[in-house]
Image (tube, rainbow, N blue to C red):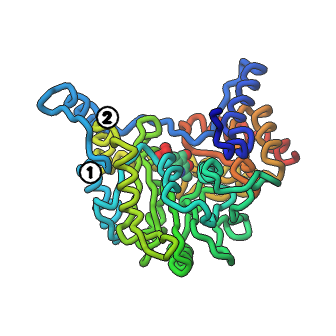
Amino acid sequence: MIRINENYLKLSSSYLFSTIARKVEEFRKEHPGVEVLSLGIGDVTLPLPRSCITAFHAAVDEMADARTFKGYGPEQGYEFLRGPIAEMDYRARGADISEDEIFISDGAKSDTANIQELFGGAVRIAIPDPVYPVYVDTNVMAGRTGPFRDERYGGLIYLDCTEDNGFIPDPPQSRVDLIYLCFPNNPTGVSITRQRLAEWVAYARKAKALILYDAAYVAFIREEPLPRSIFEIPGARDIAIEFRSFSKTAGFTGTRCGFTVIPKSCMAYDIEGGAHSLRDLWLRRTATKSNGISYPVQRAAAAVYTPEGRKEIRALSDYYLANAKIIREKMTALGFPCAGGDNSPYIWVKTGADSWRFFDALLSKTGVVCTPGSGFGKCGEGYVRINAFSQTEIVRAAMERIGKAAAELRSL
Ligand code: PLP
């Protein structure tokens, strides 16, 4: 008899975005005349930058000619992409990263999910709350947690991110082995300072722990002192892996490309305390399980590093940041305290009411879709996430509708 992986049965029942989609569908049926304005799921709306499209087309044409055709590429990714990443995203900012420490992938979701294959089954895992749900659910699937009770999985160490700590957790008192951090954060939109990140690096070095640092939203950081990469912090090379994505940076959510950085000096340990290079293990894993990412996609991603591409991606994130400013200012003026939205496309709004209740009221009274904070963890209760990835006209229209319904929404 074929048996299932029973860890899947521990997953809490409904996926956040399918519940939202169902509720929106019901609303549409009941209110066919009302245009739904979606500021919910974090997907971009602007097309790929022109230079990416040009490079994409040219690469497709290369595939049509036997002289330039490409078959299987290097599993780790082409050097024409890894080279500029190492130079422009890292060394230009003082982070000592070389091209052979970079792994091109189909995006940060798969990488943040798959990386845990490298770690022992009994590692102690610290996860922020609220959190991008992929980190939690993939650990559940891998059998690294107990059952789901009182809105939390047994066996995980949750790092509460609340108004009191500015939504940035301190290192735990207890020893943990694996730590997930994400800045600028999804869902709260907050960024971490160099000093606070250095505290985490110091903790991990002392504990011989590993930080998984998700920087999928780095393109939205505008304040100069804020670190773009964990590798800008001295000592981080030995204790951190960083994930990045072209999804939000350059509109690649449907095109799919990202990368993971594992410095050669980043180690994990066997039962006798022997050190093993995680970069070498990940290279072994990648070579075994992947034949790389499509050549045209990598060419399109490499165009991000051309002078024209730099300007275009800056314009993309500027556009979404301008939306974020509109949302943040309006929600604050209406009496809803906000975090995020300045170096991030996400605005974390304190609702003064239960998250789902606020979501339902917002949808039924205004036709605007947000994301209930409780879908990201227990500490997200009482908040909703609004994202700035829509077109500006939609953002303005949504804010106008919310303005008209504000008194009712405040009194929920
Ligand atoms: N990491 C975070 C924090 C995200 O919010 C997302 C997407 O929403 C991802 C990773 C996934 O990125 P990708 O599209 O590269 O898989």
Which residue type does callout 2 highlight? Answer: Ile
Q: Nearer the viewer, mark 2 or mark 1?
A: 2
Give whichever of discs 2 and 1 has the lower sequence position.
Answer: 2
Which residue is the extreme one toward the right? 411
- 289 or 14: nearer the viewer: 289
Which residue is the extreme one toward the front? 1
Whether residue 6 appears in this view of the structure is: yes
- 121 or 317: nearer the viewer: 121
Give the labeled residue for mark 2: 53
- 298 or 11: nearer the viewer: 11
Q: Position of residue 234 (x, y in %)?
A: 42, 78
Question: In the picture provided, is 56 more to the left or to the right than 36?
Answer: left
For marks 2 and 1, give the CA distance: 15 Å
- 12 or 359: nearer the viewer: 12
Please, is residue 412 above or below residue 269 in the view? above
Please state, as top left, top right, bottom left or bottom right, where the N terminus lies in the image: top right
Whether residue 314 appears in this view of the structure is: no
Please tell me which residue is depicted at 83% across the width and 50% down the height of the picture: 353
Please state, as top left, top right, bottom left or bottom right, where the C terminus lies in the image: top right
Please tell me which residue is depicted at 28% across the width and 59% down the height of the picture: 99
Which residue type does callout 1 highlight? Answer: Pro
Please, is residue 256 above or below residue 176 in the view? above
- The image's mark for residue 307 is 1
Dot 2: what SS? helix
